[in-house]
Image (cartoon, rainbow, N blue to C red):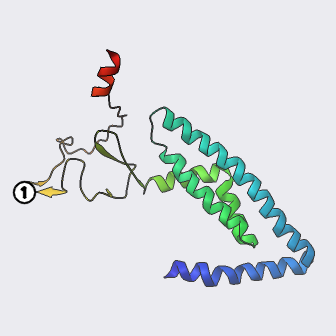
Amino acid sequence: MSVFLFLFIILPIAEMAVLIQVGGMIGVLNTVGLVFLTAVIGAWLLRQQGLATLLRANQRLNSGELPAKEVAEGLILAVGGALLLTPGFITDTVGFLCLIPGPRHWLAAQALKRMVVAGKSRSQGFYFRASGGSNPFGQGPFGGRDNGFGQQRPFDRDGNGDIIEGEYRDETESDRDRIEKN
């Protein structure tokens, strides 16, 4: 409820107050021109940064990696673009922060700490937890969360909680591949 209160009541009032103050200092036409200029610059930056992020995501997909960081950055870019198209200087400031690579990378890293990336390979399902969050399929990678013997963690026998990062590549040969070889 407090987020909606902020977004729909407090933020528009603050935006109007800032627009009135700026309009009083530099004039109405200059204020309108400045709001229009920030929207044009924001659209140009959004296009430039969005294309760069899309190309990075495509490169990661082609190399067989999940583009989780690029997906998070894409969402941040979309939010930043929407904020830049909203008239006002407060939303423009936050929108520009979403489009500048440094703050955007930091925001994406914070989002990935709470994000769950899930998908399916051709032959079997998998899920990858970037850290935080929960499995969207409602179960652990080796079945249910708990069974009659308590929670099972087959690769954490010593209980130290070490995480080993790695990549997965399905190298099983399908019937079609075997026929095409012959």
User: Taking 9 as reference, is 33 above or below it?
Assistant: above
Q: How many marks?
A: 1
> Which quarter of the image is occupied by the C terminus?
top left
Residue 82 in which image quadrant:
bottom right
**Residue position marked by numbered label 1 in the rendering:** 148
Taking the view exactly as shown, the residue that stands out farthest to the top is: 182
User: Taking 39 as reference, is 107 above or below it?
Assistant: above
Residue 80 in which image quadrant:
bottom right
Residue at position x 7%, y 54% in the image: 149
Residue at position x 18%, y 41% in the image: 158
Q: Is residue 144 visible?
A: yes
Q: What x and y, as percent, mark residue 17?
A: 76, 83
Is 101 on the left-hand or right-hand side of 153? right
Residue 116 in which image quadrant:
bottom left
Taking the view exactly as shown, the residue that stands out farthest to the left is: 148
Q: Is residue 172 visible?
A: no
Mark 1 crowd level (few <14, some 14–19, many ≥20, 10 Å Cα): few
Q: What x and y, as percent, mark residue 90?
A: 71, 71
User: Taking 54 as reference, is 90 above or below it?
Assistant: below
Q: Nearer the viewer, residue 167 or 177?
A: 177
Q: Nearer the viewer, residue 46 or 112?
A: 46
Is 144 on the left-hand or right-hand side of 132? left
Label 1 residue SS:
loop
Q: Nearer the viewer, residue 55 or 5?
A: 55
Q: What x and y, as percent, mark residue 96?
A: 70, 59
Residue at position x 72%, y 67% in the image: 85
What amino acid is found at the position of numbered circle 1 in the picture?
A: Gly
Q: What x and y, as percent, mark residue 2?
A: 51, 81
Residue at position x 50%, y 55% in the image: 110
